[in-house]
């Protein structure tokens, strides 16, 4: 079974790549993300943009993977990101 943290990391990683490529964000609910996941997404993309400029797309994608895993693991360390589905 896939953990909530891993599901978060996969979703954030997917959307971070899309946002980095398209340079635009969508509505977090249309992306299927919780508010917490959307906040993680915004942090990950903000960190990836300068890396992409300095070191290229591959380096940015590696950063996305690492930071999404780390931030999602922290957000889900107790098994859930909050008290409700949009926390």
Image (spheres, rainbow, N blue to C red):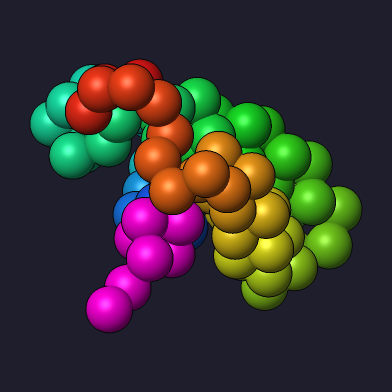
| Residue occupying the far right of the picture | 54
Report the span colored magenta. Answer: 1-7
Residue drawn at point x = 27 percent, y = 36 percent: 33
Towards the viewer: 33 or 16: 33
| For residue 59, side relative to residue 68 (left or right) | right
| For residue 38, side relative to residue 84 (left or right) | right
Question: How far across and down, in percent of the image, does residue 19 sit?
Answer: 42, 41
Q: Is residue 61 above or below residue 28?
A: below
Question: How far across and down, in percent of the image, does residue 69 sit?
Answer: 59, 60
Would residue 23 be visible to someone looking at this image? no
Towards the viewer: 73 or 59: 73
Question: How far across and down, in percent of the image, does residue 4 sit?
Answer: 36, 56
Residue drawn at point x = 50 percent, y = 25 percent: 39
Would residue 46 be visible to someone looking at this image? yes
Q: Quadrant of the C terminus?
A: top left
Is 23 one of the magenta-colored residues? Answer: no
How many labels sit on residues? 0
Q: Quadrant of the N terminus?
A: bottom left
Indicate the quadrant where residue 45 lies.
Answer: top right
| Residue occupying the far bottom of the picture | 1
Indicate the quadrant where residue 66 lies.
Answer: bottom right
| For residue 14, side relative to residue 54 (left or right) | left
Q: Is residue 11 above or below residue 50?
A: below
Towards the viewer: 21 or 28: 28
| For residue 38, side relative to residue 63 (left or right) | left
Residue drawn at point x = 86 percent, y = 53 percent: 54
């Amino acid at each position: 079974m896939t953990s909530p943290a891993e599901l978060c990391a996969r979703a954030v990683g997917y959307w971070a790549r899309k946002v980095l490529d398209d340079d635009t964000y969508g509505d977090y609910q249309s992306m299927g993300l919780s508010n917490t996941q959307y906040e993680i997404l915004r942090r990950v993309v903000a960190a990836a943009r300068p890396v992409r400029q300095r070191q290229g797309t591959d380096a940015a994608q590696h950063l996305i993977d690492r930071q999404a895993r780390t931030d999602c693991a922290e957000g889900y360390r107790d098994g859930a990101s909050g008290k409700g589905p949009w926390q």
